């Protein structure tokens, strides 16, 4: 029998549980081997009740991981079977449809026991640099080419790690030490969460999580439903077109507000692509829910109940509901455009609330380095896989400019140059903001960035491009201008594709310009002092200040002279 606690006590416990899962996530950041986790925060962590309902998620992490992982634990319970769940167990999978959307994410689930009784579960997910197969990219034609598949199974049985599984994984990936290290880091972070939970239960004299779980879910559900009930009962359609791999992709959603739920129906979106940019429904759902939640209830913590009123529908075998064996390695490209598509519909329901379109998907690339093949390589030349996460600009908001070189909606951090170069024989020659890339508007779109990458002497490499917005830039909203498009080429001027693995010879560099976010509102309405500030900071050129924003040439000259002399003050 669980002792009844006051609402104040339960609120304290709720906050404590959120801090527990945040510590769980930070433990993963500190112990992970992959730079994608340590530096970019491409992970998630959460606590669940005995039925697999998410009670709390860490603040650190990405919506794609967190919201997709919200559904994952119930799959683990079903696959493992309650009769086979023991103290000391650790479960694992990278199943795209029962995990978080592609083979490059490993999810670990650990049952939490107290006084010999199962009281809940901890789960965490991390993106790993390599899982074998063709490597991280969109080139595969089916899931079988994309890497090693690990079905839901036991990583450890009553405390003993499955050495056979470890051997199979090591024998199928390019970076075995790094991957096995990440697997143990995932297991350890769940253990940290478990320890802190038991400490909390002892402190508050809890025998189980039924009371606090009910309090969390009931309050979250009620608060979310109140926000939905306050919205207009309307149904609107949002659309956008993105590059795709070889042919453009259409995303279409009808968002309908009911009294007790919001339904997002993606009927009308493109069919499956032949290449690995298809998105499983679990990932589409994660970002569609995220878009609506940040629009109407951003401060309500994420859990099973606060996500439940957002229903997502999509026809099978469409780009947003890919089923096995569709290739899905770069499902994030489509998934990261889902929020803008939803916003395009929601802006017609509640105008003046959501931002303009942004860069959308992350500007990722992976470099596969090896000793040069056109001539003898130096003794120190080596093979290496280096993945780096980068961002374009986010869309301008109704009352604020867009954020420069900031990942929205993913929330993944840009990886420092130093960490990237430490991971392998790669050189980042240039990384800086891209002037004039943010769409003009009353509120300016966020800037993209320039990057230039090459290899240390004696190496050649393949670059796996994972870009979009080459042909379809981020559109402005309510009169705002579009942001700049993506470009990619080698330093000899030869153009490169926005997606796919491409060879870069010894001595060559790849020059990339990442997209900017769309502007919001008529550029003529932008305050002159903000335009002058942008000019002084180098965010816009003199030409844009003069021709789009109407600043007079003598004022422009005075600002630029003051900046050059060091006399300019904002």
Image: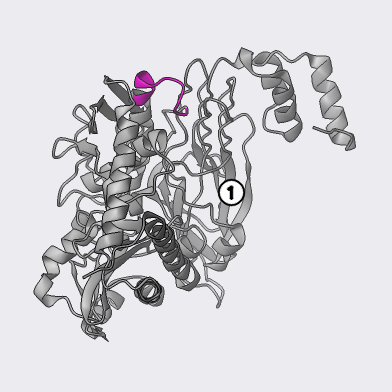
The magenta stretch spans which residues? 346-355
In the picture, the quarter occupied by the C terminus is top right
**Residue ID at (62%, 37%):** 434
Image position of 253 with respect to 13: above or below: above
Q: In the picture, residue 96 is in which quadrant?
A: bottom left
Residue 43 located left or right of residue 156: right
Measuring from the top left, give residue 1's x and y in whole percent. Answer: 21, 70
Residue 514 located left or right of residue 311: right
Q: In the picture, residue 133 is in which quadrant?
A: bottom left
Image position of 219 with respect to 169: above or below: above
Image position of 497 with respect to 240: above or below: below
**Residue ID at (50%, 70%):** 30
Q: In the picture, residue 56 is in which quadrant?
A: bottom left
Residue 567 is at least partly visible in this image: yes
Instruction: Give the residue at mark 1.
Output: 452
Measuring from the top left, give residue 92's x and y in whole percent. Answer: 25, 70
Residue 245 is at least partly visible in this image: no
Q: Which secondary structure class fits the magenta region best?
A: loop
């Amino acid at each position: 029998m669980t002792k009844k606690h006051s609402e104040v006590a339960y609120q304290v416990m709720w906050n404590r549980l959120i801090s527990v899962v945040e510590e769980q996530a930070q433990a993963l950041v500190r112990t992970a081997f992959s730079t994608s986790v340590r530096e970019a925060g491409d992970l998630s962590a959460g606590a669940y009740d005995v039925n697999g309902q998410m009670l709390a998620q860490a603040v650190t992490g990405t919506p794609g991981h967190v919201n997709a992982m919200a559904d994952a634990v119930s799959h683990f319970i079903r696959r493992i079977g309650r009769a086979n769940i023991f103290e000391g167990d650790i479960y694992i999978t990278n199943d795209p449809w029962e995990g978080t959307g592609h083979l490059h994410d490993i999810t670990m689930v650990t049952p939490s026991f107290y006084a010999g009784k199962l009281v809940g579960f901890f789960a965490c997910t991390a993106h790993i640099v390599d899982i074998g197969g063709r490597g991280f990219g969109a080139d595969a034609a089916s899931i079988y080419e994309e890497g090693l598949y690990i079905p839901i199974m036991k990583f450890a049985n009553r405390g003993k790690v499955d050495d056979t599984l470890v051997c199979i994984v090591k024998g199928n990936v390019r970076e075995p030490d790094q991957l096995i290290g990440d697997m143990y880091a995932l297991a350890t972070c769940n253990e940290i969460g478990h320890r802190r939970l038991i400490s909390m239960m002892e402190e508050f004299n809890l025998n189980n999580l039924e009371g606090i779980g009910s309090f969390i879910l009931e309050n979250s559900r009620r608060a979310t439903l109140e926000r939905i009930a306050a919205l207009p009962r309307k149904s609107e359609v949002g659309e956008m077109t993105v590059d795709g791999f070889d042919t453009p992709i259409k995303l279409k959603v009808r968002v309908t507000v009911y009294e007790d739920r919001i339904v997002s129906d993606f009927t009308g979106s493109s069919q499956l692509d032949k290449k690995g940019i298809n998105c499983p429904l679990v990932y589409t759902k994660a970002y569609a829910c995220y878009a609506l939640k940040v629009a109407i209830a951003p401060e309500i913590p994420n859990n099973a109940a606060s996500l439940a009123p957002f229903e997502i529908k999509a026809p099978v075998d469409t780009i947003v509901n890919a089923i096995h064996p569709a290739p899905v390695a770069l499902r994030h490209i489509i998934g990261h455009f889902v929020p803008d598509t939803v916003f395009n519909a929601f802006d017609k329901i509640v105008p003046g609330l959501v931002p303009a379109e942004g860069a959308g998907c992350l500007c990722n690339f992976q470099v596969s380095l090896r000793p040069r093949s056109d001539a003898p390589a130096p003794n120190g030349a080596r093979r290496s896989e280096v993945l780096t996460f980068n961002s374009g600009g986010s869309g301008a908001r109704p009352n604020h400019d867009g954020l420069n070189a900031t990942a929205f909606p993913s929330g993944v951090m840009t990886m420092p140059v130093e960490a990237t170069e430490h991971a392998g024989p790669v050189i980042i020659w240039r990384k800086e903001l891209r002037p004039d890339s943010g769409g003009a508007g009353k509120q300016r779109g966020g800037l993209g960035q320039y990057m230039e990458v090459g290899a240390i002497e004696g190496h050649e490499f393949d670059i796996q491009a994972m870009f979009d917005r080459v042909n379809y830039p981020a559109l402005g909203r309510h009169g705002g201008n579009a942001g700049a498009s993506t470009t990619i080429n080698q330093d000899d001027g030869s153009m490169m594709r926005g997606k796919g693995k491409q060879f870069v010879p010894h001595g060559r560099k790849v020059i990339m310009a990442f997209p900017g976010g769309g502007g919001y509102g008529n550029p003529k309405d932008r305050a002159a002092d903000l335009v002058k500030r942008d000019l002084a900071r180098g965010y816009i050129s003199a030409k844009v200040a003069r021709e789009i924003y109407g600043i007079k040439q003598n004022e422009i000259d005075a600002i630029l002279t003051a900046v050059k002399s060091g006399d300019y003050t904002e």
